[in-house]
Image (tube, helix red, strand yellow):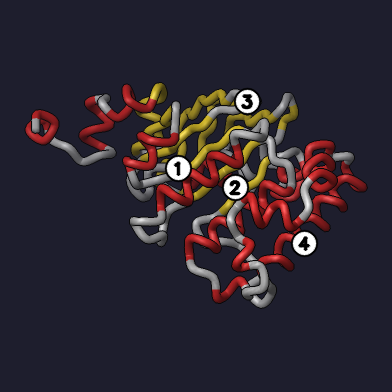
Amino acid sequence: MLQVKKLCKTFGAVTAAENLNVNIDVNSTIGLIGSNGAGKTTFLNMITGYLSPDSGSIFFRDKNITGKPPRYITRQGVYRSFQIPQLFDNMTTEENLEISKSIAASEITINGNQEAKVQSKNQSVKEILEKFQLTEFQNQTASNLPEGTRKLLDIAMALVMGPKLLLLDEPTSGVAAEDKFKIMDMIMNVVETETTAIIFVEHDMEIIKRYTDRTLAFFNGKIIADGATKEVLSHPSVKANVLGLTSQDSKL
């Protein structure tokens, strides 16, 4: 579904992406890990068109999306939920979802987006509210919602669009520790009913272990490990450069 080949990006003397090669299949759940500045966000920004690579290519569903603007890439079925939710803060939860449905309807008219058509036609706002357990918040303005609820609303708005690839930037960041698994369970339960692949950036290794079947570890702009999550987290280079574990720590 997504093929990234020999992707490179530099900012002056800093190499943010060096020869990245990644293939993502339908219905995959993939975690991106690495310290700040390791290249994770640069990778997402190039996939979604917020940055153009210096070289290399990105194909999504057999279309070359390399260097295309974000709007074009979104229309192909790639949607992103940012670390800070992108909501209409002066509007209610219900109104935010209504806007997403309206946008989905316009995508049908302009681009014939069949995935958006199915989502928009088959799901009422009431059903979406219930699915994400947002009904009690439907009349609250987005600015007054708890952080975890804001993230759920942001992701619900993305899923209304019928994404084939959903990118989540730290979905549990700012969420209370006791709520993070509840939120992730809800997201994963909803996505399991769709034909959607998920890539998410996460610093919480408990989330990575519990919800991903594959993990990519970034360090200094390179992917230093790519494979089954358990194997990647036990990789010596990942332990040292991503998890910050010494050989002594690993024995404990």
Q: Earlier in the sequence, mark 2 or mark 1?
A: 1
The residue carrying mark 3 is 26
Question: Which secondary structure, mark 3?
Answer: loop
Q: Earlier in the sequence, mark 3 or mark 4?
A: 3
Q: Are marks 3 and 4 in contact (CB under 8 Å)?
A: no
The residue carrying mark 4 is 98
Label 3 and label 4: CA atoms lie apart by 28 Å
**Residue mark closest to the camera, 4 vs 2:** 4
Label 3 and label 2: CA atoms lie apart by 24 Å
Dot 2 surroundings within 10 Å: few (below 14), some, or many (20 or more)?
Answer: some
Question: Which secondary structure, mark 1?
Answer: helix
Label 1 and label 4: CA atoms lie apart by 32 Å
Q: Earlier in the sequence, mark 3 or mark 2?
A: 3
Q: Nearer the viewer, residue 80 or 57?
A: 80
For this view, does 14 lie left or right of residue 66? left
Which quarter of the figure is the C terminus placed in? Answer: top left
Instruction: Please name the amino acid that badge 2 sits on.
Output: Leu
The residue carrying mark 1 is 40
The answer to whether residue 20 is above or below residue 32 is: above
